[in-house]
Amino acid sequence: MIGKTTWAIPEGYIPGQSTGEGRALESHETISVLNPNDQDARMELTIFFADREPAGPYALTVPARRTRHFRFNDLSDPEPVPRDTDYASLLRSDVPVVAQHTRLDSRQPALALLSTIAFSE
């Protein structure tokens, strides 16, 4: 079986500004999820902070045998993820999935892209 049901991303930060134009060059954080199962993956994402209670859970779904990329910038229910704030995130799924974390930092013209597989248990 491929995947795990719990994934942690201890590093998170959405830059509050961008130099690029349009959505493609907007500074952002993304969690990419692969669901190799024959049933939809229903997930909860919780955001943790250094100086306040967690935000969430945010309800996410990836259809069976599909992948989805969720921008933290787009999360709004129960609240938006704050910009210029350090955070960590925890993804829990009802079926095993694979999760990857990516950040595009476009605060300066020389863009930076970071990507890594999340920690699973």
Image (cartoon, rainbow, N blue to C red):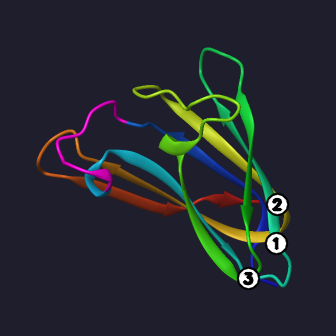
| Circle 3: residue type | Pro
Q: Dot 1, crowdedness within 10 Å: few (<14), some or many (≥20)?
A: some
Q: Assign the N terminus to one quadrant of the image.
A: bottom right
| Circle 2: residue type | Arg
Please give left or right for residue 57 compared with residue 9 in the image: right
> Marks 1 and 2, how far apart in space?
6 Å
The picture places residue 46, in percent across and down from the top left corner, at 72, 39
Relative to residue 105, is residue 88 depicted above or below? above
Segment colored magenta? 15-23
Q: Earlier in the sequence, mark 3 or mark 2?
A: 3
Q: Main secondary structure of the magenta part?
A: loop
| Circle 1: residue type | Asp
* 21 is within the stretch colored magenta: yes
Q: Residue at x 59, y 41 (%)?
A: 75
Relative to residue 116, is residue 103 depicted above or below? above
Tell me if label 1 and label 2 are in contact, CB under 8 Å: yes
The picture places residue 112, in percent across and down from the top left corner, at 25, 53
The picture places residue 6, in percent across and down from the top left corner, at 78, 57
Please give left or right for residue 22 compared with residue 88 in the image: left
Viewer-proximal residue, 24 or 112?
A: 24
Q: Residue at x 66, y 79 (%)?
A: 66
Please give left or right for residue 25 compared with residue 77 in the image: left
Q: Residue at x 78, y 68 (%)?
A: 4
Q: Residue at x 34, y 35 (%)?
A: 15
The picture places residue 70, in percent across and down from the top left corner, at 56, 56
Name the mark on residue 36: 3
Tell me if label 3 and label 2 are in contact, CB under 8 Å: no
> Marks 1 and 3, how far apart in space?
9 Å
Name the mark on residue 42: 2
Tell me if label 1 and label 3 are in contact, CB under 8 Å: no
